[in-house]
């Protein structure tokens, strides 16, 4: 394993930490094993509350990050219908509730077809999208409003995995292209249902050909690293 020439390290990011924190942990462990500083980057951010495939690249492989970010991604998302939060996930408390008695499995199935293909999507304002050189979420956390422009995205597949009509919880498998915000999809699905929706769980299960089953468990990364043969830095 030559960190300088470059290694792709897919990890299964746990819930509750940022992608940057996950990267920093792996970089520290790799630098310790290597005996010097390891250059490392990630291909596609995951929200703190999301879990799953996060591909890290070291050394010369960091040049591949842009192409890795363009790969098709697959998610499993659980949405709570009938309510919204400012961030469209559980990072914030519910700020509004809506009727759900009219929502049937048939209606959900019909509505979801509207989101398959090339569509426009407005990113969440609680996101890392830059506005005048500053992250949108920084404006929101300072109490300022932000207006973001719609972006062209592609959703290839949406499959209903489970719909609990009593709890109004909908679980979907989504296959999509670069730049798709699943939180924003939840928001838009809620609106088209004439109700509301926000994410209660999100797991990225695939990036390109890398599946979550192929990933290294983040909590056991050091154990995995200790089993690898690492070319040390020349002193």
Image: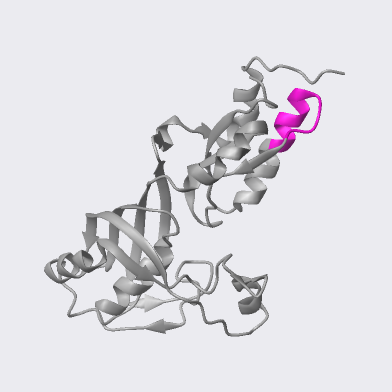
> Can residue 28 be found in the magenta stretch?
yes
Q: How many marks?
A: 0
Nearest to the observer: residue 235 or residue 67: 67
Q: Position of residue 104 (x, y in %)?
A: 15, 71
Q: Quadrant of the C terminus?
A: top right
Image colouring: one colour
Q: Quadrant of the N terminus?
A: top right
Magenta segment main secondary structure: helix
User: Horizontally, is 235 left or right of 10 in the view?
Assistant: right
Q: Position of residue 206 (x, y in %)?
A: 39, 42
User: Horizontally, is 117 left or right of 129 in the view?
Assistant: left
Q: Which residue does the image show at 30% across and 71% down from the upper left?
A: 189
State whether residue 115 is above or below residue 101.
Answer: above
Q: Position of residue 24 (x, y in %)?
A: 70, 43
Q: Which residue does the image show at 53% across and 74% down from the upper left?
A: 125
Region of the chain picked out in magenta, as a range: 27-38
Q: Quadrant of residue 201?
A: bottom left
Which residue is at the far right? 235
Nearest to the observer: residue 131 or residue 165: 131
Which residue is at the far left? 106
Nearest to the observer: residue 162 or residue 31: 31
Q: Quadrant of residue 205?
A: top left
Which residue is at the far top? 229
State whether residue 91 is above or below residue 205.
Answer: below
Q: Which residue does the image show at 38% across and 53% down from the upper left?
A: 177
Q: Position of residue 111 (x, y in %)?
A: 20, 70
User: Horizontally, is 42 left or right of 119 in the view?
Assistant: right
State whether residue 4 is above or below residue 80.
Answer: above
């Amino acid at each position: 394993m030559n960190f300088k020439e470059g290694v792709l390290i897919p990890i299964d990011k746990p819930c509750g930490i940022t992608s940057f924190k996950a990267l920093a942990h792996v970089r520290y462990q790799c630098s310790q094993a290597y005996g010097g500083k390891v250059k490392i980057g990630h291909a596609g951010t995951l929200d703190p509350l999301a879990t799953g495939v996060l591909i890290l690249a070291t050394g010369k492989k960091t040049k591949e990050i842009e192409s890795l970010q363009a790969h098709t991604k697959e998610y499993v998302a659980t949405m709570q219908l009938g309510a919204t939060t400012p961030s469209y996930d559980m990072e914030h408390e519910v700020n509004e509730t809506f009727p759900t008695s009219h929502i049937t499995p048939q209606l959900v199935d019909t509505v979801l077809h509207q989101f398959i293909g090339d569509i426009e999507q407005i990113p969440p304002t609680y996101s890392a999208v830059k506005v005048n050189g500053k992250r949108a979420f920084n404006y929101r956390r300072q109490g300022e409003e932000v207006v973001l422009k719609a972006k062209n995205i592609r959703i290839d597949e949406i499959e209903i995995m489970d719909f609990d009509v009593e709890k109004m919880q909908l679980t979907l498998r989504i296959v999509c292209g670069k730049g798709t915000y699943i939180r924003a999809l939840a928001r838009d699905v809620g609106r088209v249902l004439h109700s509301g929706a926000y994410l209660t769980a999100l797991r990225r299960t695939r990036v390109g050909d890398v599946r979550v089953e192929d990933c290294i468990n983040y909590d056991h990364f050091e154990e995995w690293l200790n089993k690898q043969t690492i070319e040390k830095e020349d002193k």
